[in-house]
Image (cartoon, rainbow, N blue to C red):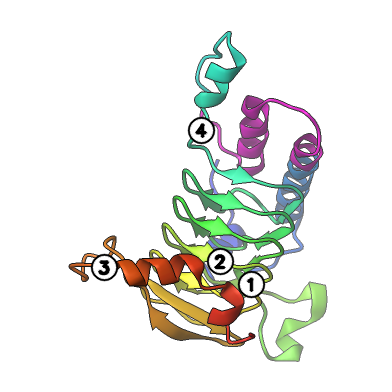
């Protein structure tokens, strides 16, 4: 089915109108899918069912693997699927991509006006907000629900750690292996393997890791510090 010109503009990050019947219907679809997912996550359902419901939120039609008779063996089929705790709130779902082994803690909000990606093995703390949507500064153009809005893609790399209550603003790209201190507001791109914190978030240090191709070695002292230093200390709050 061909996309409308209005939706194409939305996905391209151009001015578009959000309160059209088409986009209202898409958000309603996502809201219904989220209600099923959030309700199921709070009850005793199988891992298979949770994956199925999560894919429904994303509009992902990929078929699940054939079911195993043994529950433990069946659960292992989904051990690389991302884990998303409820409740979670998303606008459209179809513009969200979450990589294998990623973890999103409860009360996450994703405004996926444009594409929002979360890389493999990335850990996202509670109450994190990823805002790809924004509005014109001129109030005459903004014009409440009658005016246009726009957005910019958000891309979070593999192996990142985002602390609780972080806000990521439109157009931000977090490089691989980044750490974002709790309570930070990320307004600009973060290079690979760096720690940022604050409002607005600023670079605090480079992370020493053998995962970084630009680093040849990593000292045991640096690895221990990375494992033991509290996030509050990295954020300068203790």
Magenta stretch, main secondary structure class: helix
What crowding class fits label 3: few (fewer than 14 Cα within 10 Å), some (14-19), or many (20 or more)? some
Mark 2 and mark 3 lie on one chain; the one further toward the N terminus is 2
Instruction: Report helix, strand or loop for mark 4.
Output: loop
The label shown at residue 218 is: 3
Q: CA distance from mark 2 to mark 1?
A: 7 Å
* Depicted 58 relative to depicted 166: above or below: above
| Front one among 96 and 141 | 96
Left or right? Give the position of 47 relative to 191: right
The label shown at residue 79 is: 4
The label shown at residue 162 is: 2
Q: Quadrant of the C terminus?
A: bottom right
Residue 142 spot, x, y in % from top left: 73, 83
Mark 1 and mark 3 lie on one chain; the one further toward the N terminus is 1
Mark 4 and mark 1 lie on one chain; the one further toward the N terminus is 4
What is the magenta range?
Answer: 36-62
What crowding class fits label 2: few (fewer than 14 Cα within 10 Å), some (14-19), or many (20 or more)? many
Instruction: Report helix, strand or loop for mark 2.
Output: strand
């Amino acid at each position: 089915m061909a996309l409308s010109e209005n939706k194409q503009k939305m996905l391209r990050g151009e001015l578009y109108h959000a309160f059209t019947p088409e986009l209202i219907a898409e958000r309603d679809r996502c809201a219904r899918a989220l209600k099923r997912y959030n309700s199921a996550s709070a009850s005793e359902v199988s891992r298979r069912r949770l994956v199925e419901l999560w894919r429904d939120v994303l509009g992902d039609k990929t078929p699940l693997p054939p079911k195993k008779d043994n529950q433990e063996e069946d659960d292992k089929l989904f051990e690389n699927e991302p884990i998303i705790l409820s409740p979670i709130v998303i606008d459209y779902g179809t513009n969200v991509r979450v990589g294998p082994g990623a973890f999103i803690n409860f009360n996450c909000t994703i405004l996926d006006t444009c594409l929002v990606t979360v890389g493999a093995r990335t850990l996202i703390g509670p109450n994190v907000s990823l805002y790809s949507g924004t509005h014109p500064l001129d109030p005459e153009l903004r014009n409440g629900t009658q005016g246009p809005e726009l957005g910019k893609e958000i891309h979070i790399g593999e192996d990142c750690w985002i602390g609780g209550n972080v806000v990521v603003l439109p157009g931000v790209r977090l490089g691989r292996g980044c750490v974002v201190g709790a309570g930070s507001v990320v307004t600009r791109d973060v290079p690979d393997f760096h720690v940022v914190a604050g409002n607005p978030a600023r670079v605090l240090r480079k992370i020493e890791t053998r995962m970084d191709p630009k680093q040849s070695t990593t000292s045991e002292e640096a690895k221990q510090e990375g494992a033991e230093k509290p996030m509050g200390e990295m954020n300068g709050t203790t």
